Amino acid sequence: MRITRYRENKMDACAAFWWNLYEDMPYVHRPDGGQTVNTPPIGPEYFIKHLGYGLENLDPSHPNWPGLLSEDDILLAEDNGKICGILVSSQDQEKSTGYILSAYVERTIHGREMANGLVDEALHHFSELGFHRAVAAPRLATMEVESPIHLSLLDADFAFNRIYSNECYGVFLGGSLEGFQLQPEITAKIDQLEKEGITFERILRKDSPDLRRLDTGDEIDPFDEDAECTFVACHRGFVVGSAHGVWIFEDEGRTLCMVSPFVIPSYRHRGIGKVLQHLGMEEAVRRGAWGGWVATGLDNPARFIYRSVGYRYWYTCSSDMSKQIR
């Protein structure tokens, strides 16, 4: 095995290796460490396209591409002339930090050897640049728990740091929403909650009223990201839960969605969050979404709500692991 640097003439071989790892998986990891649902038209070209975004450094402030990326920051593990591993890193000179954004190896003993070599070389690369810190899976990037790369990072003394994140581990779920509609159990739950004085309202961003939480009295904005529509649960004129916005976005010509409910602590375990999630997903399907994905903390019971809309578990993830270099 030898570790080399990426060059443009190796792009097709890298994409083919990447696709061989993910072709039969329900999801794919992008070079920036993000992910999406793996259905057509996803293929090797998806890797090429997104690695190209990073190399062009079109927007180095974008959260999916922290720092700057060059060909020398992309490490390749080669064995007998074949690509056996890829590690994508980036540089933040101002913060004296090197980022490990994504890495790809086979889930075998051989793949673990490739992972060890890639992580060692990445740390050597950061040290030569004079960096003081290395961070794996920063911000929106994630690493699959107990994948060869994750284990190699642990062996190299990377550790979770609460300075950079509140969640040590999380889970990703996703899939198709084909055929999704409100089930009788959800409409029955809505009727039951309304008898208890809890109502559900559909709200548009353009005419959103002033909303305040019941428990704190604080004014809230129930919209996340670029969502134009959301649902809230109210009791006595105050908000007790929100769908946090029905976020619709395009990815490779596909319409995907993300809905993530929140319920104030004293109103949980009553089915409010589940109703908000299902109302949000129904709205997303009505707006053309055919699927989506979501992430949540490993200990967050919302993962059961996401399962109830038909999503399936993808993987357990770790993020924001760091190591002092010098």
Image: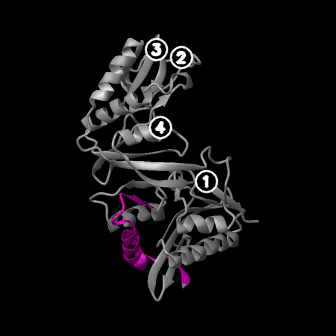
In the rendering, which numbered label is found on residue 302? Answer: 4
Q: Earlier in the sequence, mark 3 or mark 1?
A: 3
Relative to 159, does residue 178 appear above or below in the rendering? above
Tags 4 and 2 in contact by the CB under 8 Å rule?
Answer: no
Residue bearing the label numbered 3: 235
Which-is-in-front pick, marks 3 and 1? 3
Q: Residue at x 47, y 10 (%)?
A: 236
Residue 5 in sight from this viewpoint:
no
Q: Amino acid at mark 2?
A: Leu
Q: Residue at x 35, y 21 (%)?
A: 190
Tags 2 and 3 in contact by the CB under 8 Å rule?
Answer: yes
| x and y, in percent, of residue 172 in the image | 45, 50
Q: Earlier in the sequence, mark 2 or mark 3?
A: 2
Relative to 87, does residue 282 appear above or below in the rendering? above
Residue bearing the label numbered 2: 214
Residue bearing the label numbered 1: 320
Q: Amino acid at mark 3?
A: His
| x and y, in percent, of residue 249 in the image | 35, 44
| x and y, in percent, of residue 325 in the image | 72, 65
Q: Earlier in the sequence, mark 1 or mark 4?
A: 4
